[in-house]
Image: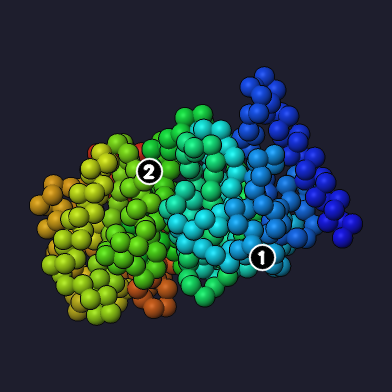
Amino acid sequence: MKKKILSKAIGVLLFVMVLMTGLAGSPAHAEPSNYKFDFGNGEVEQGYIGVSAGDKYNKKTRYGFNTPENMADVPASGEGEESDAVQFLKFGTKSDNTFNVDLPEGLYEVKVTLGNTARASIAAEGVYQVMNMTGNGASDTFQIPVTDGQLNLLVTEGKVGTNFTLSALEINKLSRHPETNRTIYIGGDSTVCNYYPLDSSVQTGWGQLLPEFVDTEEFQVRNMATGGQFARGFRDDGQLEAILKYIKPGDYFILQFGINDTAAKNNTTEEQFKEIMRDMVHQVEAKGATVILSTPQGKAMDFNEEGIHTSVNRWYRHSIIAVAEEENVPLVDLNVLSSAYFTSIGQEATIQHYMPDTLHLNRKGGTELARIVAEELERQGFDGFVEEEEKDVD
């Protein structure tokens, strides 16, 4: 108990020091712009502010939980600031069970580190920010503009039935202008989405590796794809909503669906799929951004007797091409482009790009498909992609 009290006191002292630094040369009552929070009821890591589940927001501290009665302190299996966490007992993107932090207007970079969890997403300002983080201690970073003086954040689905926990949170101000950098948004399924840890996962989606081929001084990449998702679900269940909240002229939105849309359980005819894709094109274009459609790659075993890899009749590809033509939007025919690459290396080498299920990509495969997407967009005249970069994927 003495350690906990001492750690709390140190955390408060650090907060006061940050506050005083922020006040120097600033108007009275100015909020700090940088924070490091360590959640849970264990010892507070040096350099962090300790926050327990019962710490309610108040105007003096400028941070705390909106409804602490819906929070719980829980252990976590990491070390340091990752050794404990808080659990969100009430959740949902529109939930008021948020962790609130007063912040001056501006653009912020937020790093979240989860506690013990199987699959959880991050929401803030009423929409998703990071999708389906998996594994204990998973970490990710996102940009967010703050315009109303307060960040409101929580951990949510994910997967219902799993624990939604938060171990640590870092907030750093990037700019006093509350607008995200130019952004490449990505929508898609398990062949596109992120897997954790981001820098070392065996399985990847090509969207996870696309930042390796993007000029990160020009663009950030926000991959909103999720495993098992299909076009209607992406449009209606919150992922498109999050993109529409922030997307702006100069941004790109790469949209790839079709694999799960053909599954009987998702009850989507090809004509319905086509119109849902068209609707998403229209909604994003209304924000002034550029939509790019992509077709899904095939399976590792899609070789014919002549040794040619082809899957042109799979997964509603023809309807994706039709929407691109009818709406005059750019197309990355990844289905055909990836097949050409796989044909060039042969079936045995192609298998080395896939997980054992022969559909999902490993890190080598995700890197190659990301390269193909980036090179095709660069060929079509899109800016922001790394030119002629050789990637070592062996």
The residue beneath circle 2 is 246
Q: Is residue 35 left or right of residue 376?
A: right
Q: Residue furthest left?
A: 326
The answer to which image quadrant residue 74 occupies is: bottom right
Q: Which residue lies furthest to the top in this view?
A: 25
Q: In this view, does 122 lie to the left or right of 337?
A: right
Residue depicted at x 80% and y 40%:
13
The answer to which image quadrant residue 275 occupies is: bottom left
Q: For the residues marked 2 and 1, what is the alpha-carbon distance in whole angstroms?
A: 32 Å
Point out residue 334 in the picture as x, y percentages from the top left corner: 26, 59
Q: Which of marks 2 and 1 is in front?
A: 1
**Can you see residue 209?**
no
Amino acid type for the residue under numbered disc 1: Ala
Numbered label attached to residue 193: none
Residue depicted at x 21% and y 58%:
277
Amino acid type for the residue under numbered disc 2: Tyr
Point out residue 376 in the picture as x, y percentages from the top left corner: 27, 49
Q: Which of 359 and 165 is in front in this view?
A: 165
Q: Nearer the viewer, residue 336 or 15?
A: 15
Q: How many residues crowd around disc 2 within 10 Å: few (fewer than 14), some, or many (20 or more)?
A: some
Secondary structure under tag 2 reads helix
The residue beneath circle 1 is 72
Residue depicted at x 24% and y 67%:
258
Residue depicted at x 18% and y 55%:
278
Q: Nearer the viewer, residue 273 or 65?
A: 65
